[in-house]
Amino acid sequence: MSNTQNIVILVARILLAFMFIYSGFGKLTDPSGTAGMITGAGLPAATALAYLAGLFEFVTGLAVLVGFQTKIVGWALALFCAFTGLVFHSGTVAVPGWPDAALGWINALNGIMLMKNFTLAGAYILLATFGPGLYSIDARRGALPVAA
């Protein structure tokens, strides 16, 4: 792989990591919004799950950023993105008392979020399959995935 390709993979990792580092930190410092979504989805122990999701996102985001355990983290994030997309962003949103125009906008945004999650799942599958590139902890440890 060329140096340019390794730099592109590094930039992609930074971009893929940023969202989860930022989101995970937010959930760890104020889990209330996420706990509300979890409650709305009918899942139990909403606050505990919000903290767990925040910890998962923050730690896996950091792992992607530095290229550590990329195969495992890539697959874990792909599954997480697909799961959260299906559980929290599929179907329609109905907020009692909200005007129809606002609900239409929210439902359109929810559909975009579902597509975003599936797109990210694809990116993490690529990362898990082809590896984090030369500028990573995995490369330093000699633990790069072998791409066919």
Image (spheres, rainbow, N blue to C red):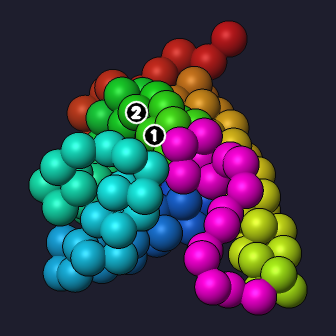
Q: Amino acid at mark 2?
A: Ala
Label 2 sits on residue: 76
Residue 34: x %, y % from top left: 35, 67
Q: Quadrant of the C terminus?
A: top right
Residue 113 pos. (x, y %): 69, 61
Above or below for 108 versus 42: below
Quadrant position of residue 53: bottom left
Q: Position of residue 33 (x, y in %)?
A: 35, 76
Query: Alpha carbon of mark 2 to alpha carbon of mark 1: how far?
Result: 6 Å
- Whether 80 is drawn above or below 35: the answer is above
Residue that carries the numbered disc 1 in the rendered image: 80
Q: Examine the structure image and report whether residue 14 is included in the region drawn in magenta.
A: no
Q: Residues within 10 Å of mark 2 (few under 14, many from 20)?
A: some
The N terminus: image quadrant: top right
Main SS type for the magenta part? loop
Type of amino acid at the residue the image marks with label 1? Phe
Viewer-closest of 127 and 7: 127
Q: Which residues are magenta?
A: 85-99
Image quadrant assignment for residue 22: bottom left
Q: Are marks 2 and 1 in contact (CB under 8 Å)?
A: yes
Q: Is residue 30 left or right of residue 91?
A: left
- The local secondary structure at tag 1 comes to helix
Direction from residue 38 to residue 134 in the image, left or right = right
